[in-house]
Amino acid sequence: MSNLLTHEEYKAIAKDLALPLNAYINGKFAAPKSGNRMDTVNPATGEKLGDMANCGPDDVDYAVTKAREAFDRGDWSRMHPSERKQVMIQLCKLMDRDRFKLAVLEALESGKPIRECQLTDVPETIDCLKWHAEATDKLYDQISPSGDDALGLIVREPVGVAACVLPWNFPLMMLAWKIGPALSAGNSVIVKPAEQTSMTALRIAELATEAGLPDGVLNVLPGDGPSTGEPIGRHDDIQVVSFTGSTEVGRRFLKYSAETNLKRVVLECGGKNPALVLSDADNLEHAAKHIVYAALWNMGQNCTANSRIIVHKDVREELVERIFGQLKEWKTGDPLDPTNHLGAIVSKEQYDKILGFIETGKKEGGKVIAGGKAIESGDGLFIEPTIFDAVTPDMTIAKEEIFGPVVAIIEVSSDAKGLALANDTCYGLQASLYTASVKNAHRYARALQAGTVSVNCYAEGDIATPFGGYKLSGFGGRDNSLQAHEQYSETKTIWIDLSDDPIDEDV
């Protein structure tokens, strides 16, 4: 991926961008049938970017009809796997061609810093799609051990129409996590981006058509939850919904499925993720670097953000000191300035929610040792990176997902108490563990109740490892890895009788 451009170059790209503001259905942009629109806003300036389509039930019906027609035609679903792979790889090439425009589009609508969009989100999106593309003609079906008198074939088939409902915190990356395996398997796909961040998904759909994806195979419906999300969840001709977002909304998709066609539902939901620092942790500078990154990456608007720092009393003082040292590098400001590591909060609603958590933390006795307030910047939505010390497990900021640049430090008197506290949550998405002992690394990683545990670092694994959660953090499947392909496929057994024995009509 190319090096960063200058602030002025990014602003020039932003000035010349043509913004996609309509749905993308059956290979072309289409205005919503109802005429309903919603504002899409740059959270760094408060500037209205445009009137985004707010699709309704009629748009959902139309998109699903076209998706089903495309699936039944078979020009994608029955295309040779190696040919599907080539179309997806061509899409990746077009995305690389337009990488600067995609990064700016993402930064404008989400408030994410351009350096993150350019150096992380865009290249990882391309790599993810390419990885799943390459898997398309390398996934084998199976033959059962059925003996000489029969042949048992176990084959995968695409489910039909798959819906992907995206969050606003990683619009491009979450798009790739879902459409990569869904398209690879041969499905037609309906994408509902988050209402705050729809434009990059729309642009990718347009590029997919340019790459040779048949009309109707990839459709993007911007809209809010009641207008677009619920009709998708209730549609009888959608076979699977993959959703990333809050646990509250995830429950709704399970309800919609139960009340309609029992479509498969895959959920990746919230987290209150711990960084557990044991008494024997020795490289505290390294730990502090990863802890700060884990807490602040994407302004803390991350489902795996390590918002609880659970640290043994013997190493707490030094760790806090080193965390302060790391904070100096995290400059907040204009997302299009590549020197900034932190940008704007995605929306006024989220901004107010985060500030409310900060005030609650203060009232309940938490000690603010860094940040703690909004950054005045016109109509921009900026909040200082905030660290609370002297936090107790019963405080709101220690229990509830904040989804902002706010971290709580909780001191424990023993490693065993730290482990118990780390697991004392309704969530179980990610956990980080810091220790100098190989034995403790294995024992505590096994004991932590999370779908991903990173040891002596903050990580979510990579594209080859399954990603999802325990408890209220996940349900029904995993993103990433070859396991992700399974949720967009049906398994069929074909049993062929090869015996020469005559049928005994008396039996």
Image (cartoon, grey):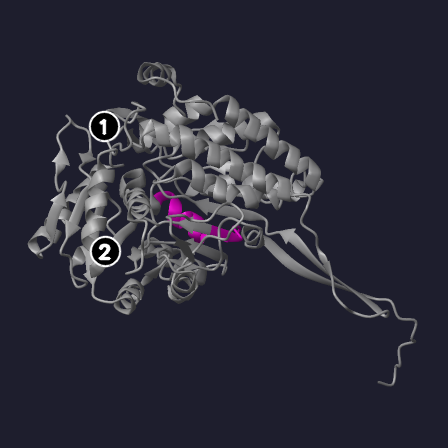
- Measuring 32% from the left and 49% from the top, which residue is drawn there? 283
Q: Is residue 274 above or below residue 4?
A: below
Residue in front for this viewpoint, 205 or 461? 461
Is 99 placed left or right of 449 in the picture? right
Q: Nearer the viewer, residue 352 or 41?
A: 352
Q: Is residue 490 left or right of residue 191?
A: right
Q: How many marks?
A: 2
The answer to whether any part of residue 399 appears in the image is: no
Q: Secondary structure at mark 1?
A: loop
Q: Quadrant of residue 121?
A: top left
Residue at image mark 1: 333
Residue 326 visible in the snapshot: yes
Front in this rendered view, residue 329 or 325? 325
Q: Which residues are magenta?
A: 227-241
Disc 1 to disc 2, C-alpha distance: 33 Å
Of labels 1 and 2, earlier in sequence is 2
What residue is pinned by disc 2? 315
228 is within the stretch colored magenta? yes
Q: Position of residue 373 (x, y in %)?
A: 12, 39
Q: Is residue 185 left or right of residue 410?
A: right
The picture places residue 26, in percent across and down from the top left corner, at 54, 33
Q: Secondary structure at mark 2?
A: helix
Q: Residue at x 18, y 43 (%)?
A: 386
Residue 423 to residue 315: above or below:
below
Assess disc 2: are there few (<14), some (14-19) or many (≥20) residues with their C-alpha within 10 Å of its C-alpha.
Answer: some
Amino acid type assigned to the residue bearing label 1 in the image: Gly
Q: Quadrant of the C terminus?
A: bottom right
Q: Amino acid at mark 2?
A: Val
**Position of 496 compared to 138: left or right?**
right
Task: Find residue 380 and report its horizontal and vertical position in percent.
Answer: 19, 29
Q: Confirm whether the magenta stretch covers residue 473.
A: no
